Amino acid sequence: FQAEDGIRDVERSRGLGDVYKRQIDNIDILRWSMNKEIDVRGLECPGPVLKTREALEKIGSNALVVITDNETARDNVERFAKKQGFNVKIEKVKDNFKLLISKSVNDLPSGMGEIEPEKKNKRVAIYINSNRIGNGEDELGKILMKAFLKTIIEVKPKPEKILFINSGVFLTTLETDFFDVLTELRNNGIEIYSCGTCLDYYNVKDKLKVGQVTNMYEIVNTLHTVDKVVSP
């Protein structure tokens, strides 16, 4: 109300309750806009999880926004983050998904919300006895094997050796699609070995492109002495 003398009645305050409500309503907007953001759209598995892990290792106690364009990547990133002790909130924006990954130190048990550090003094060997993963479609098996090999470099502790036997030696000899990832593994200190008997059987020893030739004694000795053997 405004009186004739031009003096307007003072609007009554809505009280602190309304102030707090407005702050709560706006908190998600602030959290989405003030945090580091990574875009994992278009990345093949396990790319979205690996990029998320890398980003979480760098941001410390801050929050992270991950943008993806499919439900599989969304679910994989969410599952990974929750397993590490982070809180995850998901918002669908048109054809994409935004995941707000954050942690509250006070709300989490000791050690949660931190990327697990590399375990020291743990010896791991990878044992690959086929050039494909699984028994279904050959092309799918190839895609899965390539994804498996690409992921090896990201896991901790880093494996000491990768042993290829039977048709697994095709990956180090004939299948050029795998040479780059195997070379990257070797350049990161992972030893690559192919079974000599298998190379001879398939007549591909002269085509070995990555790694060294080994024998059954060395293969068995490695499997026997390491702390853990992993096979896809």
Image: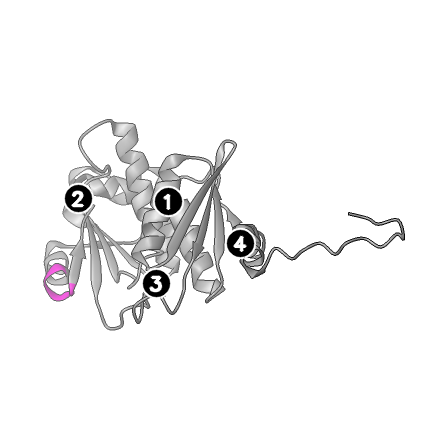
Local secondary structure at mark 3:
loop
Which callout, 4 or 1, points at the residue further toward the start of the chain? 4
Task: Identify the magenta region.
Answer: 223-227
Q: Which residue is mark 3?
A: 189
Magenta span includes 186? no
Residue 39 x/y as whole percent: 51, 45
Q: Which quadrant of the figure contains the C terminus? A: top left
Q: Is residue 23 above or below residue 68?
A: below
Please tell me whether mark 4 or mark 1 is closer to you in this view: 4
Which callout, 2 or 3, points at the residue further toward the start of the chain? 2
Q: Are marks 1 and 2 in contact (CB under 8 Å)?
A: no
Residue name at image x 35 percent, y 42 percent: 75
Q: Calculate the distance from the C-alpha at mark 4 to the C-alpha at mark 3.
A: 55 Å
Q: Tell me the kind of residue under disc 2.
A: Asn
Which callout, 4 or 2, points at the residue further toward the start of the chain? 4
Q: Which residue is mark 4?
A: 21
